[in-house]
């Protein structure tokens, strides 16, 4: 790992960084890439097309996590409150019922509990770490999208987040009713969490602990040194691949990084592209080859 | 709890010498419980007909006791009282209260269980739930303790038309007068469980002073 420096990078290095990201974008074949960065060590920020809206895919689970902990903060829920695990949801389109296919969740833990109950903190854990769609819709069913949106507004992180529905609502997808995010929108939430300012330092820490449990690590963490720890959330559908998280390196404050990408359905190299951008950012912040 | 509820007369009101639960007149419960249980009040069903809610309840002192008390040979009390965060907060802690008709449901389900020859699983929120439960929009036999949502029988999950209709038929053949919800998605139908109920049955223990 190169020696860590903490000066604010000069403008020339920032220009070089932007050029490198542009090069990665043009070589990747992606339809669009957005990057937002906030470095707590130097205060440096990068906003590369960071106000462009993308389909949120599973990154919308970060605002939902915030909404669940807001309910805990208000005393409406406890971490060990129990929720009925039922695989039946209503589309935002005409309340048509739908189910979450078990094959769409990375593990079967939540599906195996159908008919029984799981704790709020268990559902939150599965929603983030293995991106369980069933857990997500169950939590959202308890707290409600309106409450999540109110929370985002109260915390002043609603800009760049457009939560309309749960996940796997195919009918809504066909009608173009989707959850949307910008890189800056997710960045604001993650900065709030990493600074311990979401409700309380203790609740922020609990949310960060859940994000640290992420099991899909082919994006931001893939090309970081072994000493790096990343609390993050990925999102992937046919045309989308995102990763958004907080990167902790030894002997420096963390940086928050959001990388959103959009692709043709047959586009390949998505994780590789995200990992390349993440690596470029890492080198830039640690004064490595980014200033070539 | 601000005052002790009036238990029905004395120990002799229990329905059998070995039945360990006390009967409680819901009208004597503290205000937060009365507000949630609405004992003896009228409540409209989906067709607009007024139904009278149960007034007498068994008091369940603890989860531990619910895990041990047999309501029927194959059913323990806890299986009928699993509710999630949608239940009114006072009714998610102990002591808990269930309408006295819950025993009739348990005996009926026991007979059903014998007919299917394997374990019958009642879902969370699928046994007794109070009129204050967030699922309770209109009068439902669940609030009388006389309805059950069964999500699994043996290894079969009841989430398909064939499974639901197959076991629905067995229930109707086994239990005279039982009502089962037809398969389907609209309100009034069920597509991920078998709902069966005995109707709006009120159970008034013999010796209560009404």
Image (spheres, coloured by chain):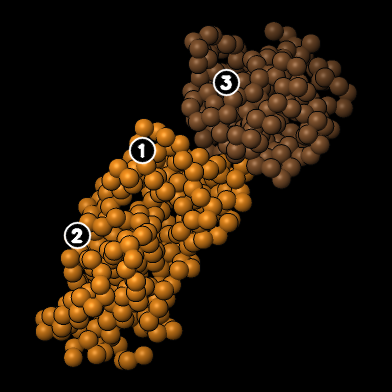
* Quadrant of the image occupied by residue A270: bottom left
Residue B160: image location, x then y, percent: 60, 38
Residue at x 48%, y 27% (from the top left corner): B186
Residue reaching furthest left? A11
The relative height of residue A238 versus residue A174 in the rendered view (above or below) is below
Q: Quadrant of the C terminus of chain A?
A: bottom left
Q: CA distance from mark 2 to mark 1?
A: 25 Å
- Left or right? Give the position of B185 relative to B172: left
Which residue position is annotated with label 1? A92
Which badge, 2 or 1, comes first in the chain's sequence?
Answer: 2
Dot 3 alpha-carbon crowd within 10 angstroms: few under 14, some 14 to 19, many 20 or more: many
Residue B29: image location, x then y, percent: 62, 21
* Front: mark 2 or 3: 2
* Secondary-structure class at tag 2: loop
Which residue position is annotated with label 3? B140
Q: Colour of chain A?
A: orange
> Could you say which disc has been placed on residue A52 in the image?
2
Residue B190: image location, x then y, percent: 56, 30
Query: Which chain is indicated by disc 1?
Result: A
Query: Which chain is indicated by disc 3?
Result: B
> Could you say which disc has been placed on residue A209 in the image?
none
């Amino acid at each position: 790992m190169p020696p860590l420096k903490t000066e604010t990078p000069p403008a020339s290095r920032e220009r070089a960084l932007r050029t490198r990201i542009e090069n990665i974008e043009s070589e990747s074949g992606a339809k669009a890439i957005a990057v937002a960065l906030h470095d707590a060590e130097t205060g440096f920020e990068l906003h590369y097309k960071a106000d462009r809206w993308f389909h949120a895919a599973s990154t919308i689970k970060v605002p939902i996590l915030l909404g669940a902990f807001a309910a805990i903060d208000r005393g409406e829920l406890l971490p060990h409150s129990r929720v009925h695990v039922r695989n039946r949801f209503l589309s935002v389109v005409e309340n048509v019922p739908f189910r979450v296919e078990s094959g769409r969740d990375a593990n079967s833990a939540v599906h195996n509990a159908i008919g029984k109950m799981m704790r709020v903190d268990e559902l939150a854990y599965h929603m983030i770490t293995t991106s369980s769609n069933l857990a997500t819709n169950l939590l959202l069913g308890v707290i409600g999208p309106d409450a999540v949106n109110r929370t985002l507004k109260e915390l002043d992180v609603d800009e760049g987040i457009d939560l309309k529905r749960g996940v796997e609502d195919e009918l809504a997808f066909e009608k173009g009713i989707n959850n949307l995010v910008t890189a800056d929108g997710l960045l604001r939430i993650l900065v709030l969490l990493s600074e311990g300012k979401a409700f309380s330092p203790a609740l922020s820490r609990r949310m960060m602990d859940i994000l640290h449990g992420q099991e899909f690590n082919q994006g931001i963490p893939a090309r970081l040194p072994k000493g790096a720890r990343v609390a993050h959330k990925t999102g992937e559908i046919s045309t989308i691949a995102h990763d958004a998280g907080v990167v902790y390196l030894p002997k420096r404050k963390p940086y928050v990084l959001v990388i959103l990408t959009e692709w043709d359905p047959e586009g390949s190299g998505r994780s590789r592209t995200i990992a390349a951008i993440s690596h470029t950012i890492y080198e830039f912040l640690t004064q490595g080859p980014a200033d070539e | 709890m601000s005052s002790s509820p009036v238990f029905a007369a004395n120990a002799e009101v229990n329905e059998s010498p070995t039945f360990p639960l006390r009967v409680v007149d819901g009208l004597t419960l503290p205000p937060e419980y009365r507000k949630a249980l609405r004992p003896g009040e009228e409540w409209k069903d989906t067709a607009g007909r007024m139904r009278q809610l149960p007034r007498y309840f068994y008091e369940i002192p603890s989860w531990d006791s619910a895990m041990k008390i047999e309501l029927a040979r194959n059913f323990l009390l806890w299986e009928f009282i699993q509710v999630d965060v949608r239940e009114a907060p006072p009714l998610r802690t102990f002591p808990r209260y269930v309408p006295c008709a819950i025993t009739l449901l348990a005996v009926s389900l026991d007979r059903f269980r014998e007919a299917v020859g394997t374990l019958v699983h009642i879902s969370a929120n699928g046994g007794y739930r109070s009129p204050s439960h967030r699922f309770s929009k209109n009068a439902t036999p669940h609030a009388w303790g006389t309805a059950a949502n069964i999500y699994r029988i043996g290894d079969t999950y009841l989430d398909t038309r064939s499974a639901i209709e197959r076991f629905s038929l067995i229930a109707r053949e086994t239990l005279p007068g039982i009502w089962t919800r037809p398969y389907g998605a609209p309100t009034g139908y069920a597509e991920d469980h078998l709902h069966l109920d005995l109707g709006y049955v009120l159970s008034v223990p013999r010796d209560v002073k009404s």
